[in-house]
Image (cartoon, rainbow, N blue to C red):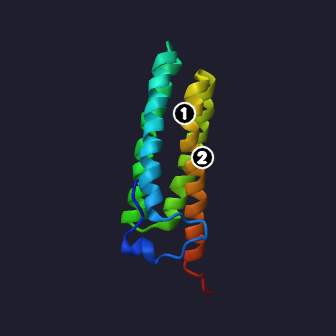
Amino acid sequence: MGDSGQSSWYLSLKKPFFNPPGYIFAIVWPILYCCIIATGIQLLKSGKNKALNTNLILLFGHLPINSLWIYVFFIQHNIALGTFILLALTVIVWNMTFRFKIADKQAGLLFLPYSLWLTFAFILNLSIYLLNRPFLTY
């Protein structure tokens, strides 16, 4: 997700019509990381209880899953496992978004662009998998 997607392997894949050009990823990800940081700041401002600790653990604890997807997809070239990881990450992040919105409406709104982008990324990843999966022969 942090990669611009310009490796020769990635360029060789069949991609759906809605696949954005590589430079879009380089623009979007820094903005999304700023949204994640701003969410954390907003949660710190508004939280005064156990929920704050849980929300901050979730906020920063989910990032290794994001990194795992990058490794699996771009380094291991495992599109199927990458799709599964991204699905799990998307579900986790949407749950976090709703949880953050309950704790602080502004925190939930700050996290929303990340949730939306991950949803798009999952659809893109799934589409790449479907377009490039090896055909089963019996």
* Residue 92 in view, yes or no: no
Residue 16 occupies which quadrant of the picture? bottom right
Q: Is residue 91 above or below residue 78?
A: above
Q: What residue is at 46 percent from the left and 36 percent from the top?
A: 36
The residue lying at 37 percent from left, 75 percent from top is: 8
Label 2: element kind: helix
Q: Secondary structure at mark 1?
A: helix
Tell me which label, 1 or 2, sits earlier in the chain. 1
Q: Is residue 66 visible?
A: yes
Amino acid found under the numbered disc labelled 1? Leu
- Name the residue located 49 percent from the left edge and 65 percent from the top edge: 21
Residue 60 position within the rendered picture, expressed as x and y whole percent measured from the top left: 42, 35
Quarter of the image for residue 25 reads: bottom left
Instruction: Tell me if residue 125 comes above or below residue 47 in the rendering.
Output: below
**Residue that lies at the very extreme toward the top in this rendered image:** 48
Where's the N terminus, which quadrant? bottom left
Amino acid type shown at disc 2: Leu
Q: Where does residue 116 sit, x and y in percent of width and height?
A: 60, 46
| Label number found at residue 70 | none
Question: Image height check: is 48 above or below 24?
Answer: above
> Label 1, on which residue?
110
Q: Which residue is mark 2?
A: 116
